[in-house]
Structures are given as structure tokens and as C-alpha cells.
Image (tube, grey):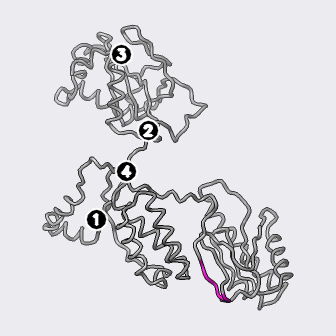
Amino acid sequence: MNFDGTTYRQKLGTAMGTKVAPTYATLTLGYLEEKLYKTVEENFGVECKHFIRNSWKRYLDDCFIIWTKSTDELQSFYDILNSMNPNLKFTMESDENKLPFLDVMVMKKEGKIVTDVYYKATDTKQYLLYDSCHPKHIKNNIPYNLARRLCTIISDKDILNVRLDELRELLKQRHYPTLLIEKGIDNAKLRDRNSLLQIQEKPVKNLIPYVSTHNPKNQEFFQVIKTNMPILENDPRMKDVFSEFQLIKSKRQSPSLKKILTRAKFNNTEETAGVKKCHHPRCGTCPFLQETEQFIFKNGRKFVIHSSFTCESSNLIYVMTCSGCGEHYIGQTGDTLRHRMTVHRQQIRQTEYQCTAVSGHIKTCAENIFPNFTVFPIYKFYNKTSEKERETKEKHFISLFKPKLNALS
């Protein structure tokens, strides 16, 4: 398409600080566009309305059009845009030779439109280091995907070759092997640009993801699973089930140092520290729960509670006290305190279910006392944790307070 006039880009100058901001922007602009077409038809006629409808391009609240009419008409059109809604303000950028739209630089060259990649001034191009701790297949695909993006956006071959040379140098600085870089670029250049611009329709399949946490030291079991899938498929019923599904491998990011040391969730400033019963009529833990804001161990050491606990609290460290001898046991659970105490009470009542020595001790030492033990939660994990992390914290408290009942096991 020829540039016969001014190209301009219009941007919605409003901020929506919610997770659904893109949806709000799309709905709002979609509504305003229908209002815009009607207003343009009333002021400039049907022909101008069709021109706007066919030429107007938008992604969320970023809009673009190649303007082939007069400057005065452009200003009038801009005034109409800003009259659509008093709470929305459009800004306009215009240039007769080139203008960016998203990550594309649209340019006029010898009477034709050519496109180049556009980088913001703040783009540092800090691509993933090749020696970083990420799955190898992700790092190996980066050169191809970056090159493919350039081949899709850039329409001029001379410009494309310059950008690919720049990409080579950037990837070398990020420690990517030369052979891997060249292979990725060559594979991207083999793809026809017209096919890259087309939306690829993929058949919809039912997927069964095998999810594991990425750690180079962990053994990879996905190939073992795939190798043994024929065993399951030998069964007629299982064969029918797996014929409709595709098994895929996926990786979960291991926690970074930042995630380990910081919290994404803030404590409620209004919650009162201490332990409170839930008072649910069917709660079996309330009679055993010790309500207070601090706990004093038998050796005289005091522990002050800084979190709020009830029978429904989960992911925590707790202290059980035998009502017979007053000795303590420190345990951990990822479940709710109520469910964990239900297990303890069952093990105390029925010896065949006893898995811990503390249950046998309480049954013998406090058999004729009710409650035969009391429980007091002392530490809450606010982030999702593994059993190993809770066990580590449990060992810390055991080492610190030295409860005698833990020594029984």
C-alpha cells in the first residue's frame, strides 16, 4: 500500500491497574469504535465511514491507520475520537516516513510499505544466558524463535540480513554456541514469510501433562514413562483411554533465591496474633486446643506467637503436650490442624493404627484424663511449602526446645 498522506498512531491514554485491564480495554474500545463509525458517517458520509472501518487497526488500546485524506480531516477525526467519552483521552503520533506500532516499525520506501522490527529505547536485549539453569531444550530453541520473529516482522531482505547479523552478535555475548545460532537462523530463513504470517490451526487434543520441577541433578523420568506406555496400552480398556490423549512433558520452575527468602503474600495487618478455637459444633480439635498468645515449654523457655491460628490453620508446626506428664512433642503438617489432630486421636485410641511413639505414650500416660493431650500451633508457613521444608523447620524447633517425646521415636 502506498503512503499518500500521514500515518498516525493513536493510543488510549488511560491506566487500569487490574488483572483484567486488557479485557476492559478491548471491550471499551470495541464499543467506542461502533460509536465512532456512526459519528463519522453523520459528519463525513458513508464513504469516509467505510474508509475508517477498513483502514483502522487496533491491538487492545493501541490503534493505527494509514491516513490518505487531508490534514484538516485528520484533525477533525482526532477531535471526534476525543469526544467519544469524557473519561478517555487519546494521544496521537504522526510521521510521513516511519512510525512504530507495537514491535513493528512501519516505513515508507520507494512508494511502498516496508516493515522492520522496533525496539524501545529501554530494551536491553538481555536474552537468557546459555549457561543459566534452565531446561536445555528451552535454551536451544531461543536462537530459532528470535530469528523466526525477525523473519516474520521484517519484509525487506536487506534489512532482515542486518538484523540477523545483530542477533548473532547478541547471542554470542549471551554465550550461545555458534553452531546453535547458525542452525536456528538457517531454519528460520527456510520458512516462507507468507506462511509465517498465517495463523496456524492446530488440531485440538486432550493432553496429559507430566509436570516435574526442573533440577539438573534430578533423574528425568519422562522417557521412562513413554517407554513403558505400551504396557498400559496392552490392556483393552486402558488402550481406549490413552488413544484419546497425548502425553506431554512440562517443567515447573524451581524456587529461586528470591522466592525462598521473600513472601508474595503480606500478612493481614488486622489479624490478631494468638491461638483461637473455631467453635464449630462438630470440631473435635477445639477441646484439645490451647488458647493463648504464648507458650511456655517445660524447661521454662517462652515462645511468643506472631501469627493467628485456629483449628482450620494449615501448613504449620505444632506442639502437643501430654496431660499426664506434661512433656512435649513437636510435629509438622501441611494439612489443617483439625485433620492432623484427628489422626493423632485415632492413633491414641486404636493401637493398630499407631505410627508414632508419642501416640503410644499418651495412651499409657494419660489414659484416664480428658483431654489426654493439648495442642498448640507455634509457626505458620505463609507460602506453599514442601514436606522437606516443613521437616527442616521442625528439626530446628526440636533442636531449640529439646522436647522429650520426640526422642521416643
Residue under circle 2?
A: 260
Residue 241 locus on image (x, y percent): 24, 68
Magenta stretch bounds:
110-115
* 260 to the left or right of 113: left
Q: CA distance from mark 3 to mark 4?
A: 38 Å
User: Gap in Å between the C-alphas at discs 3 and 2?
Assistant: 25 Å
In this rendering, the label closer to the viewer, 3 or 2: 2
Three-letter residue code for mark 4:
Cys
* Cα gap from disc 1 to disc 3, whole angstroms: 49 Å
Cα distance, mark 1 to mark 2? 31 Å
Give whichever of discs 2 and 4 has the lower sequence position.
4
Mark 1 and mark 2 lie on one chain; the one further toward the N terminus is: 1
Q: Dot 1 corresponds to which residue?
A: 247
Residue type, numbered disc 2: Ile
Image position, residue 250 (x, y; %)? 34, 59
Chain-order first, disc 1 or disc 4 = 4
Location of residue 244 (image quadrant) = bottom left
Would you say the residues marked 2 and 4 are in contact, meaning their CB atoms lie under 8 Å apart? Answer: no
Q: Point out the tag, 3 or 2, that comes first from the N-terminus.
A: 2
Disc 1 from disc 4: Cα separation: 25 Å
Say which of 185 and 332 sits in front: 185
**Amino acid type shown at disc 1:** Leu
Could you say which quadrant of the image residue 123 lies in?
bottom right
- In the depicted view, which residue is nearer to us: 95 or 13? 95
* Residue 113 part of the magenta segment: yes
